Image (tube, grey):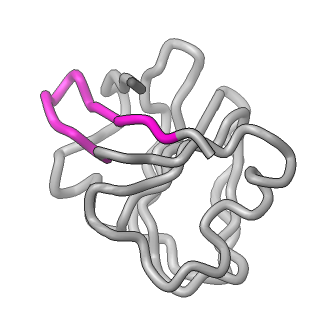
Amino acid sequence: MMAVRVENTTRGTTLAQSAQVADNIVTRFLGLQGRARLDEGHGMVIRPCSGIHTMFMRFPIDVLYVNKEDRVVHVEAAIVPWRLGRVMRVSRYVVELPAGTAARTGTQVGDQIALG
């Protein structure tokens, strides 16, 4: 699975130094399931994606919903395991991060995201 760096260019912050890209039916469905934790500096980019679930997960995550212009359209903070996230039809992809990352970096709706 390919990995990318995720930057919030609006705030000048790094959200993930290494985020795995889930871009096929299997990797998108599995996501972070079965992992014991998501370490700081890591994450997952799921594309295409307009909604997530945290079934079979063991830890809370922050989720950024990002549109085709790479702007954050919704932030869900610290979604606990066994929940359904919001469905955002305008979302092109989501970025899953360790819980607290959005708050720590000041990431909010309207921020510009860059994958590299």
At which x and y percent is residue 60?
46, 77
At which x and y percent is residue 50?
70, 40
Above or below, comparing residue 51 to residue 97 in the picture: above
Q: Quadrant of the C terminus?
A: top left
Q: Quadrant of residue 41?
A: bottom left
On screen, residue 31 versus residue 114, left or right, reads right
Q: Residue at x 42, y 60 (%)?
A: 62
Q: Quadrant of residue 29?
A: bottom right
Residue farthest to the top, as pictured: 69
At which x and y percent is residue 3?
48, 41
On screen, residue 77 versus residue 46, left or right, reads left
106 or 21, nearer to the observer: 21
Residue 103 belongs to the span the image colors magenta: no
Q: Residue at x 52, y 79 (%)?
A: 80
Residue farthest to the right, as pictured: 25
Above or below, comparing residue 98 to residue 20 in the picture: below
Q: Residue at x 56, y 79 (%)?
A: 35
Q: Residue at x 40, y 57 (%)?
A: 97
Residue farthest to the front, as pictured: 1
Q: In this picture, which residue range is highlighted in magenta?
A: 3-16
Residue 15 belongs to the span the image colors magenta: yes
87 or 21, nearer to the observer: 21
Q: Main secondary structure of the magenta part?
A: strand
Above or below, comparing residue 81 to residue 66 in the picture: below
Report how many numbered discs are placed on residues in the image: 0
Above or below, comparing residue 78 to residue 96 in the picture: below
At which x and y percent is residue 30?
75, 64
